Amino acid sequence: MGRRDVPGKGMGRWHRLFLTALLACIAASGCGAGDRPRPDVILITLDTTRADHIGAYGYTRNITPSIDRFAADATLFTRAHSTASWTLPAHASIVTGKYPTSHGAHFDVDRPDANLGEALEGEMFRQMTVNRLGSDQLTMAELLGEAGYRTAAFVGGPFLEPVFGVLQGYDLKDAEIRTIGGRPADELTDRAVSWLREVPREQPVHMLVNYFDPHGPYEPPPGYDDLPLARVPLEPAAPGRAGGPAPAIPLGPLIDRYDGEIRFMDSQFGRLLAALRLLGRYDGALVIVVADHGESFGEHGMMEHGRWLYSEVIHVPLIIRYPGGRRAGESDSSLISVVDLLPLVSAETGLTLPEGVDGMPVGALRVILAESYRDNLFIKLFGPRFDRDLRAAIRWPWKIIQSDRGEVELYRLDEDPGELRNLADGRLEREMLSLLDDARAGLKPPARRAAPEGVQPKTLEQLRSLGYVE
């Protein structure tokens, strides 16, 4: 009996999958030969990539020519937001269409058995507590796989390794991460293209490519380390952890290194698109390019990402090329969340959404929601100011951030995009808090929270090197 072949609740889950596949065939006018082909679904996640460091979003430094050309052939969403400010909950939202509260894959200080340190001896590793994405959650890959798609994931960063649950449903989980900085974009592109070449052209595919390069410790490869300050030696206090208060050091060398990593990733993104065209899989495909979160460089006194919800970490690039080039060259200012990507895929492929999805059709969303959960390690490293859960809501142009300790911040984003003037006071604050409460009231936490099991020492070593565990 396989891991998911359990009686009772599990059977209901697979019955829903079977019904989804059956309804998808009906929606596509039958399942026999000659039916309208479903589009390939290509999902490319740009880990830790700020929207304002991409030319199509106004960055004046020419480091993303491939992404910019793609954006001219696609639809650029200017008000896209993530649900979280770090990799695991954000990617879980992308693949399930659910907010972190609903899918459960996030920090959890109340569960010692969810501790990443369980795989190593000694109390020094028993700091970071996190839930995996539970097997009761249905993912994009599972839905597409049951509908006849060949599925494969090519992963650059540690929190997408199979033990954390986001890759459930992929036939191929190419996630062997061997180096501290994750897997480089050229290796991921090589392996993704090689896999595509082996799949018969008539077979629809769903492919996830998770580019991880723009991430601390900011070490662009040779040939991409030539921006003016990229080779300047870093100060001893330069960040090497996943987030925290900004040290009093020059930020120019860090930004040039970060931009160099984006430029390298962009070159490999261009290679991947060229391969899709060569293999005849570009024009008819649904191609989604999105970041899971951004990065801080001193804004609000913070560095990197992880435990706050300001725009530099939750406003993300989202560029979608629809099958056949519909809406090519358009810019869309609708509010859109990464939870809306699964409903988009459903609409484009004819699949029926599973129950419990929080996302909505493109253009229907009126309130953006983001969440951040407290983490024992961060509290230990940086003190009681981080001993809080956060939630945020955006009803354009207003944004509110509230902690479970009572602190409230209110910003008007069109006049104050840097979120520098806290306007929390009076009637509007009460209205936005009520809006936030209403948005979160509809979220349903999973019945069972799942701990990651069998985390390998090499994964923990990488997470520790990136500052996620001590």
Image (spheres, rainbow, N blue to C red):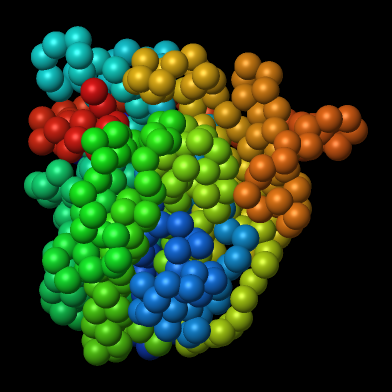
Q: Is residue 357 left or right of residue 419?
A: left
Q: Residue at x 40, y 76 (%)?
A: 62
Q: Residue at x 48, y 85 (%)?
A: 73
Decide which of 28, 329 is in the foreground and name it. Answer: 329
User: In this rendering, does residue 347 appear at all?
Assistant: no
Decide which of 145, 65 is in the foreground and name it. Answer: 65
Quadrant in the picture for the N terminus: top left
User: In this rendering, does residue 335 appear at all?
Assistant: yes
Q: How many marks?
A: 0
Decide which of 379, 252 is in the foreground and name it. Answer: 252
Percent coordinates x, y for residue 125 in the rendering: 20, 18
Decide which of 183, 137 is in the foreground and name it. Answer: 183
Query: Against 49, is 273 above or below?
Result: below
Percent coordinates x, y for residue 323 in the rendering: 47, 81
* Quarter of the rendering containing residue 10: top left
Q: Residue at x 17, y 55 (%)?
A: 183
Quadrant in the picture for the C terminus: top left
Query: Against 378, is 306 above or below?
Result: below
Q: Is residue 429 left or right of residue 454?
A: right
Query: Against 307, is 180 above or below?
Result: below
Query: Against 39, is 394 above or below?
Result: above
- The residue most toward the top is 123
Q: Is residue 434 left or right of residue 135?
A: right
Percent coordinates x, y for residue 153 in the rendering: 25, 58
Q: Residue at x 49, y 61 (%)?
A: 51
Percent coordinates x, y for residue 16 in the rendering: 45, 48
